[in-house]
Amino acid sequence: QSVLTQPPSVSGAPGQRVTISCTGSSSNIGADYGVHWYQQLPGTAPKLLIYDNTNRPSGVPDRFSASWSGTSASLAITGLQAEDEAEYYCQSYDSSLSGVVFGGGTKLTVL
Amino acid sequence: QVQLVQSGAEVKKPGASVKVSCKASGYTFTGYYMFWVRQAPGQGLEWMGWINPNTTGTNSAQKFQDRVTLTRDTSISTAYMELSRLSSDDTAVYYCARDTVNGGVDYWGQGTLVTVSS
């Protein structure tokens, strides 16, 4: 049971838009600790996709965007491509646990 | 360029300990926290702890606090994670990763598979 809750899976057709939610609480996202998002392709290490709620590292396509409000955050992917098929994780800090927390991960399938 | 190169795969028996190394290059080793994250087969990411290579200060997840030891050797820009009293539940890929605090974890090692089996 992860502190940050993500849907186990989402899917979409090429070209479509999908969103992945990350629901936390008042001790993590709701406490204004930044949310970061990672993409993990099969058999590889995670890759930073979004940092500090809404910021994209250089080299990440602008098809990837994120938002947050209250105790939840959301990752949006527009113009879905086959190469986007991967596992996506949110991450934040939790003051009650005094440590870093990850969401359980969401498997994105491109139909 | 920033690189984190981890030690090779390990096979351990239950009850043993394992020590994984992570050699950093391409940046000032003492300027960034180092995270340790593990991923059991088919499972999600699990944060284990961090070390501040500048001060040696550490913080570990409650689940691992009595079993994990995080250290570093600044002379060779290397961080270490030692996990004791291994069980089959500790079979996982262990990653070191550079934390930028507000900027997320921007570089990851290639991962080290630790298999615990009798």
Image (cartoon, coloured by chain):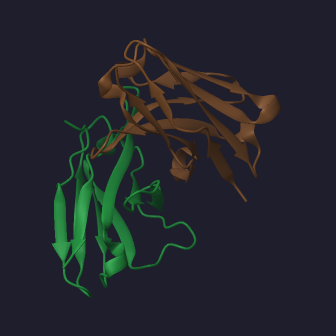
Q: Nearer the viewer, residue A47 or A96?
A: A47
In the image: residue B106, left or right of residue B26: left
Q: Residue at x 44, y 15 (%)?
A: B67
Residue B4: image x %, image y %? Answer: 64, 47
- Residue placed farthest to the right in the image? B75
Q: Which chain is brown?
A: B
In the image, residue A45 sits, relative to residue A80, either above or below, namely above
State which quadrant residue A85 falls in: bottom left
Q: Residue at x 31, y 25 (%)?
A: B88
Q: Which chain is green?
A: A
Residue B117: image x %, image y %? Answer: 35, 25
Quarter of the image with the C terminus of chain A is: bottom left
In the image: residue B61, left or right of residue A19: right
Can residue B98 be seen from the camera position used here? Answer: yes
Q: Nearer the viewer, residue B34 or A21?
A: B34
Q: Nearer the viewer, residue A43 or A30?
A: A43
Q: Residue at x 24, y 40 (%)?
A: A25
Residue A64: image x %, image y %? Answer: 38, 73
Residue A15: image x %, image y %? Answer: 26, 88
Quarter of the image with the N terminus of chain A is: top left
State which quadrant residue A79 falls in: bottom left
